[in-house]
Image (tube, coloured by chain):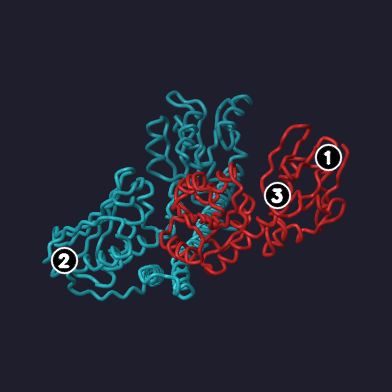
Amino acid sequence: MVSMKTPLRVLLIEDSENDAILLLRELRRVGYDPFSLRVDNAEALRNSIENEKWDIVISDFVMPRFSGLEALKMIREKGLDIPFIIISGKISDETAVIAMKAGASDYLTKGNFARLGPAIERELQEVVIRKERERVLKQLREREQELDILKRMDRLKDDFIGLVSHELRTPITVVLGALDTVLTEHNNLSQKDTLQLIYDAYWEADELSSILTNLLELARARADRLQITEESVDVYTTIKNVINRIKRQVATRKITLKCDRKLTVMADRIRLEQILRNLISNAFKYSPSQSIIHISAILVNQEIIFRVRDHGRGISAANQKRLFRPFERLEFKEETTTGTGLGLVVCEHLVKAQNGRIWVKSKIGAGSTFYFALPAVGMAK
Amino acid sequence: MKQFSILLVDDEERILNFLKTKLKSLHYDVLVASNGSEALELLQSQAPDLIILDILMPKMDGFETLKRLRVFSSVPVIMLSARGDSIDRVKGLGLGADDYMIKPFNPDELVARIEAVRRRVSNAAQRKNPKNLVMGRISIDFNKHVVLVHGEETKLTRIEWLLLSELVKNSGSLIFYEELLTRVWGAEYRNDIQILRTWISRLRLKIEEDPKNPKIIRTASKTGYIFQPVED
């Protein structure tokens, strides 16, 4: 029977050249084709384990400049899972126990190599089994983590649906309630009261339409189906239009606008309006009554930078990172204000789809400033 | 005669607006508050006859407001919720709300509920009280609204009084869940057994010697309760 010899990368920790030769001869005899390196001090061991991969370490126990236990400790500290067999001229049972406790795989006495072949075979097999088990465990842990993430997303989506339906309920209540009041009580109402109720219903319907637009845009963005029609858009007029629409609804905040009337931006007009509307109505929602909201747009390095600044209570650094991620607003524990956080997520999608950037600067107690930048006309990429 | 006055509490200005217009047009006296603390102040200074209380408000929500006002007032409260599930409903009624409506609602239905709560409260006030009762360590004076346990006064809330007087009126005989729920909260709550259980257990805590092993308000499994005067 002709058997192929099994290649084996052996690291020998051994001060005696002769002992090493004897050992290698024994390995060949039991069917291995060893590739080996002999080291006899810590420095050499460190180099050899950092630069090469070994199947097995066979180490003398007592050496003039090194010891088997030290070598074992170095290898285990490196986190290397290599079988470590100790071979010693004289080894007491106590020493053997200490070595095994320190993580040695086996120990043999010099001159009695009968167990060497089987020991190596067994250790190599165990390495394979250990590695397989680790691989499976690692996979299991990864699947568990994925499952946790999916469960969390699922829960957030449920919460999100709940919140959206809640967000829709308030405007619908007003639309139905105000119009119903006009219909049932018109004989008792002054013209002023009637008009106010109709206005209320109109603006809440407008709010509903904006929530719906955000939902649709988010769905389109997530399906990669945002169709952007870019054109040259007049910045001042666009901002002014959005402000006027919001202002007529809620006259409880002052708005300042700084913007050069000649600025034009490369953008999808409808989307630009939606971004501005989301940012400005957030500024309304999250800042105290009678406070000022500052809006500006300037040209910097071939980009138009839009800025919406409020005097609300600000957003912590940790929450700022999560602002633009879908559904994350739901987990802001300290928030008591209602809202889905949908607006900002949509803003980010819309800005990015127009080759722009969006970011926030905020500090608790010092208000928030939202920025977004879009290419100035003639500079579009 | 003083108009029936209603305090509206909601942080949404436009909801307040149509409710105020509707109720004023029907000749109710209307007060408005846009948050819980404002509502508590108005309750103390103006003593409205009924409160319509939104649940979701910033800072102090409707539940917290209700909890605080129940410490000193038994004014009827109708809660408004923007959540469709029944958790809010159970919680609100458990805290002592009289009725509960989900947004969006029809304003005329709200008016109907206001009138129903108003009727229930005034019926309860006019209803013939059961005879005063002395049994062992407990004495109950239904006219003066005083319960003495071992000679010491125990305070009951309006709902606890209603429950107790319904039970005592049927002393010794079984009264069904639906019957009790209808008489105390109204017909639309006749299936809310959980709410009834909550309030019965509170009442037991106040009058039973050992609330876990009740002798006075006995449970008839899956049907109702029996009030059993005992000489303990």
Task: Give the CA separation, mark 2 to mark 1.
Answer: 87 Å
Evaluate whether label 3 is on the same chain as label 1.
yes
- Within-10-Å neighbours for mark 3: few <14, some 14–19, many 20+: some
> Element type at marker 2?
loop
Mark 2, Cα crowd under 10 Å, few <14 / some 14-19 / many 20+, is many
What residue would you read off at disc 3? B199
Label 1: element kind: strand
Q: Residue at x 45, y 71 (%)?
A: A188
Which chain wears cyan?
A: A
Tell me which chain appears red.
B
Q: Amino acid at mark 2?
A: Ala
- Quadrant where the N terminus of chain B is found in the figure: bottom right
Q: Is B89 left, or right, of B57 in this rendering?
A: right
Residue B149: % across, % down = 77, 35
Question: What residue sits right under mark 1 in the picture?
Answer: B134
Q: Position of residue A179 (x, y in %)?
A: 44, 73
